[in-house]
Image (cartoon, grey):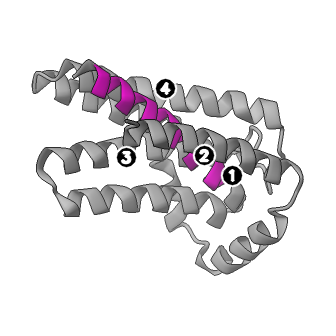
C-alpha cells in the first residue's frame, strides 16, 4: 500500500517536471501577468518586512532554534530533520535556478533578488520551514490556530515576492512543489524509521 507521503513525493516530482516544461515554454506568461496585475495594488513597505521571513538568514536561524527546541524536548529525529529539510530545500532550489535560468521581473539586492527566478527560494524555504512546523504542531495536538497561522506565513512570504515584483507567480508554484517533494520524502523517512 502506498502512503500519502510517497504519493505526495511522486506526484509533486511529476508535477514539478510538467510545470517546469510549461514555464520554460512560456505558457504561464498570461497567468503570471494577470496575478502580478491583480496583486500590484497591494505593494507597499509592509511586504518588504514580510518577505524577510523567507530570507535565508531568517529560515536558517529559525530552523536552528527549532532544532534546539526539539533537542530540549528529547526528539532528536525532528531536531535534525527540520534544519536538514530547510537546507536541502534551499540547495535544491538554487541548483534548479541555475538549470532553468529564468530571468526575474526585476533585480533588487535589498530584497534578496539577484539570482535567477524559477523556482522561488523564498516560497520553497518558507514552505519547508513553516509548512513542516505546521505539520508537526497539527500532528502533536491538532492545533488548528497554530497550523493556520503557519500556513498564512507561507502564503504571505510567497505572495510578497510577487507583490514586490521580484518573482512571477509561476516561480512561487515551482518553489512550493520543490518544498512539497522534500518535506514528503522526509515524512517517508520518518514513517520508515517508526
Q: Which residue is under mark 3? A: 130
Q: Could you tell me if the residues under marks 2 and 1 are in contact, i.e. CB atoms within 8 Å?
A: yes
Magenta span: helix, strand or loop, mainly?
helix
Q: What is the distance, in whole Å, between disc 2 and disc 1 at their CAs? A: 6 Å
- Pinpoint residue 2: horizontal percent, then vertical percent: 41, 37
Q: Which residues fall within the magenta stretch?
A: 172-192
Q: What is the distance, in whole Å, between disc 1 and disc 3 at their CAs? A: 18 Å
Mark 1 nearby-residue class (10 Å; few <14, some 14–19, many ≥20): many
Q: Secondary structure at mark 1?
A: helix
Q: Secondary structure at mark 4?
A: helix
Residue 171, numbered label: 1
- Pinpoint residue 141: horizontal percent, then vertical percent: 11, 50
Q: Which residue is under mark 2? A: 175
Relative depth, front residue between 162 and 148: 148
Disc with the residue nearer the chain's start (3 vs 2) = 3
Mark 2 nearby-residue class (10 Å; few <14, some 14–19, many ≥20): many
Amino acid at each position: 500500500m502506498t502512503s500519502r507521503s510517497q504519493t505526495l513525493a511522486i506526484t509533486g516530482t511529476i508535477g514539478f517536471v510538467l510545470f517546469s516544461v510549461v514555464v520554460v515554454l512560456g505558457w504561464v506568461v498570461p497567468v503570471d501577468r494577470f496575478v502580478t496585475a491583480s496583486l500590484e495594488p497591494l505593494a507597499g513597505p509592509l511586504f518588504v518586512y514580510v518577505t524577510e521571513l523567507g530570507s535565508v538568514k531568517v529560515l536558517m536561524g529559525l530552523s536552528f532554534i527549532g532544532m534546539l527546541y526539539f533537542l530540549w524536548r528529547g526528539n532528536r529525529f525532528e531536531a535534525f530533520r527540520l534544519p536538514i529539510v530547510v537546507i536541502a530545500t534551499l540547495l535544491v532550489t538554487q541548483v534548479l535556478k541555475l538549470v532553468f535560468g529564468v530571468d526575474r521581473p526585476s533585480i533588487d539586492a535589498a530584497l534578496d533578488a539577484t539570482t535567477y527566478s524559477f523556482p522561488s527560494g523564498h516560497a520553497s524555504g518558507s514552505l519547508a520551514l513553516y509548512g513542516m512546523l505546521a505539520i508537526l504542531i497539527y500532528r502533536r495536538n491538532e492545533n488548528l490556530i497554530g497550523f493556520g497561522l503557519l500556513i498564512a506565513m507561507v502564503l504571505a512570504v510567497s505572495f510578497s515576492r510577487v507583490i514586490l515584483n521580484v518573482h512571477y507567480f509561476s516561480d512561487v508554484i515551482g518553489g512550493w512543489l520543490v518544498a512539497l517533494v522534500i518535506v514528503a520524502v522526509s515524512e517517508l523517512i520518518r514513517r520508515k524509521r517508526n
